[in-house]
Amino acid sequence: MDGRSMRLLLFSLASVFLLGASESPQEEAAEALITENVLRAHVRFLASDLLEGRAPATRGDALSEAYIASQFEALGLKPAGSEGYRQPFELLGVLGHPDVLTFSAQGRTLSLNVPTEAIASSGNAAEQTRLLGAEVVFVGYGIQAPEFSWDDFKGMDVHGKVLLVMNNDPSDDPALFAGKTRLYYGRWTYKMEMGQRLGAAGVIVIHSNASAGYPWQVVQTSWSGEQFFLPSPDLGPPLRSWATEDACRRLVALGGKDLDVLRRAAEERSFRPVPLGVTLSTDFKSTVRHTHTANVLGVLPGSDPLRAQEWVVYTAHHDHLGMKANAQPGEDAIYNGAVDDAGGVSQLLAVARAFASLPHRPARSVLFAAVGAEEKGLLGSEYLVAHAPVPVGQLALDINMDGFKIFGATRDVAVLGLGKTSLDKTLAALAHAQGRTLVADPFPEQGSFYRSDQFSFARAGVPGIHYFSGVEVVGKPAGWGREQHDAWVATHYHQPSDELSPDWNLAGAVQDARLYFALGYAVAQAKGLPTWVKGDEFEAAGKAIRSAVVH
């Protein structure tokens, strides 16, 4: 059997699963438009110094929106925003000015300097954050999970207290919290949400490279500048903070405790919160402003009168971290965000071009959404889901593109959340047609499924998927791809050095973008809609939104 025949057979297998996917010469021609030069050209502009790092509500942010909107218009996509291609939304910007966190116990004090040893910001958009002698309590992982019979709080009233909490979730037992695979319980955002829900005065997350999945410098770059929120009466605890592992050792030692002993105890269901005999005092002002950014939305209307009401969604975030405050003379102060996420936006634009080139539109509509303020907490995608152009139950699927791979073609496709949706068989067949196989997230301990925009859709019940080239790089020895990934994260992730480089090999990024196109087209043509698998954490939400849709 020749290569084309095999490809047609595999697409037929995919069509059996999705009840409607098939390949044609027009699809092959559309895929061929996705090339390295196309991806590199978009990144060259979006990650240029001209855009000054694309921080939300800045000139660079507006330039990125204008560029993407002009590309959508050139492709003939229809505007899907509330203001043409733009979907503006309000942000609360909060720039804190803390210097130090001071801890006291029995006449002794410990001062942690910001940002070298700790990070602190207002969690509720207050112009002044003042804690005077707030009791600090170690709460282990800070998790309440009835389905695992796990409660780290055991009924303790933590209202007005400061929670010292471990990052990640328990991982020793495969039957608990998915073992080494981090669930949402392990995300720092969950810890902050728990603090707000229980009325805590503050939350301090203990940082370590292993528990966070990135070095302390990433916390510094992500949290030192202006923080953003969607306006809400319930934003978070008054103080949101991180501290280095070494600083936390000294903090608990101030109260006569040992951090390692506390953490070992927190691995058991029987753990109870531990008052440390330590209090926290801090007093700092914040600059608070109301501002705006926008999602950029373009839609290719579907051709089927009924199925066109259902939209396949592609997302990538156009924002990044902006510019470094107080940069030294001659220092590179711009967080260009070339891989993260000018790379993802370049793939989104390339896939949009492929769809726009089709002589016959697919049955379902296809929405291309370049969302804003992802780096500040998935805010753009959260807003989009809450204000979707169609009822959320009519969103068929979100295919998210966050970062792309720069080390070459791979033999594997890493799927975040493999096994969560009904799309695995279809995606496996499409990947096999590229000579690749599906693998689970090679870095499950990082909880990446919950760290990007597909999570906003998943929380609302919309099947969301995020995948990219794995670590088995063609022509390289085993382990090489993982080593390159780890080195890139340690050196360039959320750093000014994430810049376009002539050394990039974008063959894997092209593979991925073509696979994004193929999967989206298959879903856009299918008779049925993707679903969450039985028992998945998002299954109930998915059923609820689908049942609410009446054609």
Image (cartoon, rainbow, N blue to C red):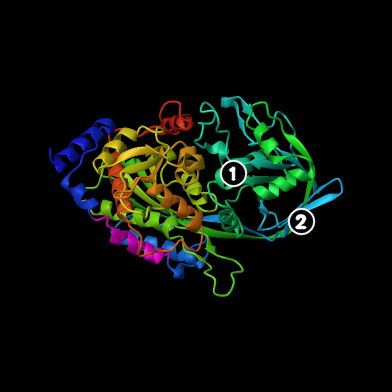
Which quadrant does the N terminus fall into? top left
Disc 1 and disc 2 in contact, CB within 8 angstroms: no
> Which circle, 1 or 2, is nearer the viewer?
1
Residue 210 visible at all? yes
Is residue 42 found inside the magenta-colored segment of the image?
yes
Category of crowding for the residue at label 1, using alpha-carbon neighbours closer than 10 angstroms: few (below 14), some (14–19), many (at least 20): many
Q: Residue furthest bottom?
A: 329
Three-letter amino acid code at disc 2?
Asp
Image coordinates of residue 79 in percent, x first then y, are 37, 55
Badge 1 or badge 2: first in the primary sequence: 1
Image coordinates of residue 450 in percent, x first then y, are 50, 42
Residue at 23 percent across and 33 percent down: it is 13
**Bounds of the magenta segment:** 33-47
Residue 238 visible at all? no
Please state which of residues 109 and 235 is positioned toward the viewer in this rendering.
Answer: 109
In this figure, which residue is indicated by the disc labeled 1? 188
In this figure, which residue is indicated by the disc labeled 2? 283
